Amino acid sequence: MLPDPDLTLSLDGAELFDLTSHYLPAQEVALLRKAFALARLEHGEQVRKSGEPFYTHPLTVAYYLAHFHLDSAVLVAALLHDVAEDTKVSVEEITREFGPNVGQLVDGVTKLDALENGRLLSPEEKQNHTLHKLFEAMIRDVRVILIKLFDRLHNIRTIQFMPHHKQVRTAEETLSVYAPLANRLGMWELKTELEWRSFQVLNPLSYNLIEEKLDESIQQQQSIFAQVSQEIATCLAQNNIPFHKIELSPRNVYSEFLSCCQEYDDELELSRLEVDRTLRLVVLLE
């Protein structure tokens, strides 16, 4: 599961260091502390649109990655990926302090950021060019893409603080570039959240209507789900088949919107929207 979107990290990064201490050697956690101190120092008085210190953004991205037990080089690069772009510290200096592995990751993320922020291309050209460069980066080192994906996740989770025109631009880019990329990497939960949060920005009326319809449908299906899942669990137990859980497939407002428009000639016919959700059985492998 993805980290809780409502989680607020301490300004001293305590949650990150506590989490990583459970799977990284002490010397690598110490390197993380060093990178965090540098990010905090160099970003100084910079603030996000929300009013929070800017360094809380790379801190959160690093925490998201640590949630999935990524290696220390990725976490250090996540902490420093904006330092090379927004401060006087160069990639070369980062490489000297933290090693070539971290330096290459920071350089890869910085180049993709520069591409995104460019103004020489049309929106469509920039989208296609960005996707091409992302795939190039993925071939060289997929960890660059992981940093970018979780960087985008935190930005889309806090998009309400951006000016409206930037919200729209970010949401369009997320739908056309980052959600498909997450899908190709098999990161379906991430893909789903990127989609529905972007759709919520781009088409809030349809989003709210479909969300309401989904709520109604889930309540109606709840008793059926409980009955069927119990029957499946009983059958598995009788046949000595261990399983982890039985659950409903995640709700996805955006995919419901697409299927509805496709079926009814691009018109949102909510009265005819039928929400079909599947049961997922997660078994235990010996």
Image: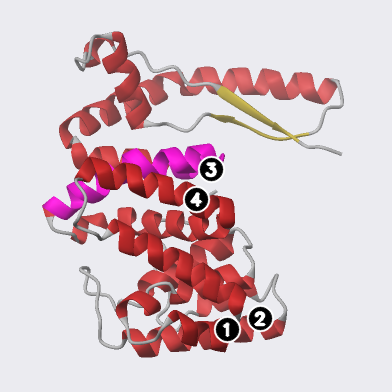
Is 85 situated left or right of 161 in this image?
right
Q: Do labels 2 and 3 touch, CB within 8 Å?
A: no
Q: Looking at the image, is mark 4 or mark 1 nearer the viewer?
A: 4
SS assignment at label 4:
helix
N-terminal label among 3 and 1 = 1
Q: Do labels 3 and 4 touch, CB within 8 Å?
A: no
Q: CA distance from mark 3 to mark 4?
A: 19 Å
Q: Residue at x 64, y 67 (%)?
A: 71
N-terminal label among 4 and 2 = 2
N-terminal label among 2 and 3 = 2
Q: Which residues are magenta?
A: 165-192
Q: Do labels 3 and 1 touch, CB within 8 Å?
A: no
N-terminal label among 2 and 1 = 2
- The answer to whether residue 262 is magenta is no
SS assignment at label 2:
helix
Give amino acid for label 2: Glu
Q: CA distance from mark 4 to mark 2?
A: 29 Å
Q: Do labels 2 and 1 touch, CB within 8 Å?
A: no
The residue that mark 1 highlights is 98
Residue 187, disc: 3
Q: CA distance from mark 3 to mark 1?
A: 29 Å
Residue 279 visible from this viewpoint: yes
